[in-house]
Image (cartoon, helix red, strand yellow):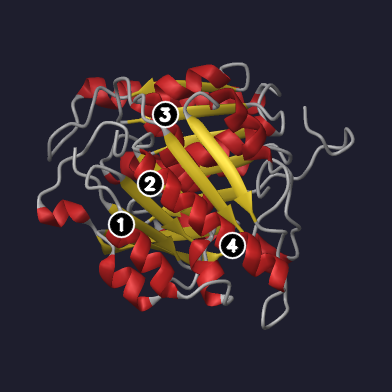
Amino acid sequence: MDQSGGIKMRGYVQVYTGDGKGKTTAAIGLAVRAAGAGLKVFIAQFLKMGEYSEIKALKKLSKHITVEQFGRGRFRQGKPLPEDVASAKEGLEKATEAMHSGLYDMIILEEANVAVWKNLFPEQALLDIITQKPAQVELVITGRGATPRVIERADLVTEMKRIKHYYHNGVRGRIGIEK
Amino acid sequence: MKGYVHVYTGDGKGKTTAALGLALRAAGAGHKVFIAQFIKAGDFSEIKSLRRFSDRITVMQFGQGRFRENPPPPLQIGLARRGLDKIKQVMTSGRYQVVILEEASVAVSKGLFPVEDLLDLIDAKPADMELVVTGRNADRRLIEKADLVTEMVKIKHYFQKGVKARVGIEK
C-alpha cells in the first residue's frame, strides 16, 4: 500500500555501484524510508551470511521489510563452489517470485553486481529481472562492478566513488559501522 | 573503539540514505545515534520509521526547508546556529557513539555557517565517536580532515526525465 491516494506510483530501477563506502547503507536507508511511507520491501542479500547489525535493527520493521540471505559468506578469490552458485540461484528465484507476488513495492538485490562479477549467475539473469519488473515495483541493485548493460538499463545510477577510505590506514571492519 | 569522520558528498542519490543506513546499523549494534538535520524540515518518511528506534536514534531538525535567498534568511541562520550548539552539547555528553550532520555541507555552501565551525566540531570530537557529514559540495578543507570520503557521483538520474520526488523513495 502506498500513500498516494491509492494510485500506484510508477517504479524505477536504481543501481548503486562503485568502490566507495555507502552502497549497502544507502539501500538499507531506502528500505527504511520506504517502510516509513507504508511500502513493503523485500531485500535479497547475495554473498552475505550472518547477523549484520543492520539485520538485527531491521527486525523492528519486519512488518514492512523482509530480508533473506542467499550466500554462505564471502568465498575466497577464484571459482565459486557449486553450493555458492546454488544459493545465488535460489536467491534470484525468490526475488523474482517476490517481485511478481504483488506483496512488495520495492525489491533490493544486495551485492547482485558482485554476484555477476563472481560468476554466481550470468549478467543475463539480472537483465531478465529488470525486463520482467512490474511497472509499479521499484528495483534496487547494489554492488561494485555494475556491468555496462545493467547501467544502461537502469533509470538511476549512482557511483559511490572512494575519495578516501580508512581501510587504507589498516582500520578493520567494525561492528555497528561496517557490519 | 576509535571513531572516524565520514563525509558523503556528490550530486548523486544516496547520501542521506547512506547516513540513514549507517544509523540503523549502529542502532542494531546497540550504539546511540544523534542525527542533526540542517535545512530540512518536515516529516520525511524515514523519520516516521526512525521513531521505532527512538530508544537509540534521536533526530532533530534545524531548518525550515530549502531556500534560494542569498544571503540566507536570518531565521535559517539562527536555526543552523542552534543546531551547531546542540551538536556540541551532544558530543560532550558522552551519550552518543555516532553523530550524523545531515546536509551540513549544504549548510556551509549556502552560507548558514562557515566551514570553520564544522572543522571545529571535528577537532572537538571525542576519540571514540563516529562523526558523519553529508551534503553535496563538501568543502575541500572538510574532505582533507575526514578519514573516509565517498563521492556519490550521478551517472544517471530519473529526475532528468522529469520524474518528481516520490513519497517513500525520495522523501
Q: Report the residue marked by disc 4.
A: B80
Counting residues from the start of the chain, the first of labels 1 and 2 encountered is: 2
Counting residues from the start of the chain, the first of labels 4 and 2 encountered is: 4
Disc 1 is attached to a residue of which chain? Answer: B
Counting residues from the start of the chain, the first of labels 3 and 2 encountered is: 3
Disc 2 is attached to a residue of which chain? Answer: B
Camera-nearest residue between B143 and A163:
B143
User: Secondary structure beneath disc 2?
Assistant: helix
Whether the residues at callouts 1 and 2 have beta carbons within 8 Å, the answer is: yes
- 3D distance between C-alphas at marks 1 and 2: 8 Å
Disc 4 is attached to a residue of which chain? Answer: B
- 3D distance between C-alphas at marks 4 and 2: 16 Å
User: Secondary structure beneath disc 3?
Assistant: helix
Q: Quadrant of the N terminus of chain B?
A: top left
Amino acid on which disc 1 is placed: Ala
- 3D distance between C-alphas at marks 3 and 2: 17 Å
